[in-house]
């Protein structure tokens, strides 16, 4: 791992623990370098935070790009369930979960470039989900209803899943939680036979 990558990685850990309240001295201490050495890679703390958050956001949203490719031939229910399961799997790392929570709590503190990238990826995921619902209605796997409503419910489901993962430690509990939450959602939108 390069020194720059190590600095970004340790900043990620510190950000998960302390939010914006860590110092460059904290980073230097954990990495085992002098504080001045950080400036060989980053202009300042804000630049370091920006690069760390961009790396995190791109990694998180790459999960959705993989899902889109992987789920092309799947039924609607399976596409939606794989989104929920993949989110749960991604957030098995509690630091990732804490960083996600901090981003959500402090969105107004995000550097402009990070906010723009986050907004772009959130629109990508939103459009992806919207298309899954359109296809599900067209294929009669989902009842004919307002896509905006079920889209909103699904986004709320995802946020609820992420929040719920904070309290669940065991993998079995997480899988059961995700499946139960998803099944409750699916029962409300599926085509009734």
Image (spheres, rainbow, N blue to C red):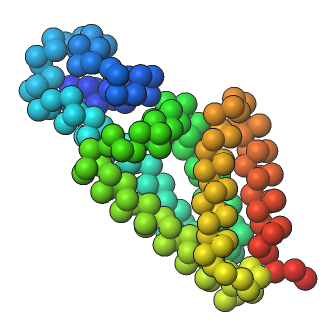
Depth check: give the residue in front, 96 or 45: 45
Q: Is residue 117 above or below residue 107?
A: below
Q: Position of residue 109 (x, y in %)?
A: 33, 40
Task: Name which residue lies at 32% across and 43% down.
Answer: 110
Depth check: give the residue in front, 71 or 25: 25
Is residue 72 visible to us here? Answer: no
Task: Name which residue lies at 9% across and 26% down.
Answer: 40
Q: Position of residue 16 (x, y in %)?
A: 44, 28
Q: Is residue 13 above or below residue 71?
A: above
Q: Is residue 191 above or below residue 52?
A: below
Q: State the image quarter where residue 42 is shown.
A: top left
Left or right of 143 on screen, residue 164: left
Quarter of the image where the C terminus is located: bottom right
Depth check: give the residue in front, 44 or 88: 44
Quarter of the image where the N terminus is located: top left
Q: Looking at the image, which residue sits at the far front?
A: 108
Task: Name which residue lies at 15% across and 23% down.
Answer: 38
Q: Position of residue 98 (x, y in %)?
A: 50, 33
Q: Position of residue 150 (x, y in %)?
A: 67, 71
Q: Please give the count of numbered marks on the rendered protein.
A: 0
Is residue 12 visible to us here? Answer: yes
Depth check: give the residue in front, 149 or 63: 149
Task: Name which residue lies at 15% across and 11% down.
Answer: 34
Q: Looking at the image, which residue sits at the far right?
A: 193
Left or right of 191 on screen, residue 150: left
């Amino acid at each position: 791992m390069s020194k720059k990558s190590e600095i970004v990685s340790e900043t990620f850990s510190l950000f998960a623990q302390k939010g914006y309240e860590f110092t460059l001295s904290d980073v230097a201490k954990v990495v085992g370098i002098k504080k001045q050495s950080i400036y060989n890679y980053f202009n300042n703390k804000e630049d370091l935070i920006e690069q760390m958050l961009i790396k995190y956001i791109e990694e998180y949203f790459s999960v959705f790009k993989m899902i889109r490719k992987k789920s092309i031939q799947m039924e609607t229910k399976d596409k939606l369930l794989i989104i929920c399961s993949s989110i749960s799997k991604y957030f098995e790392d509690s630091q990732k979960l804490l960083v996600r929570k901090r981003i959500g709590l402090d969105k107004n503190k995000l550097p402009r470039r990070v906010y723009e990238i986050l907004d772009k990826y959130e629109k990508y995921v939103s459009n992806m989900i919207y298309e899954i619902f359109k296809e599900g209605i067209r294929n009669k796997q989902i009842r004919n209803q307002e896509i905006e409503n079920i889209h909103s419910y699904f986004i709320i489901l995802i946020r609820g899943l992420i929040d719920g993962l904070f309290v669940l430690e065991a993998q079995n509990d997480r899988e059961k939680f995700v499946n139960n939450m998803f099944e409750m959602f699916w029962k409300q939108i599926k085509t009734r036979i």
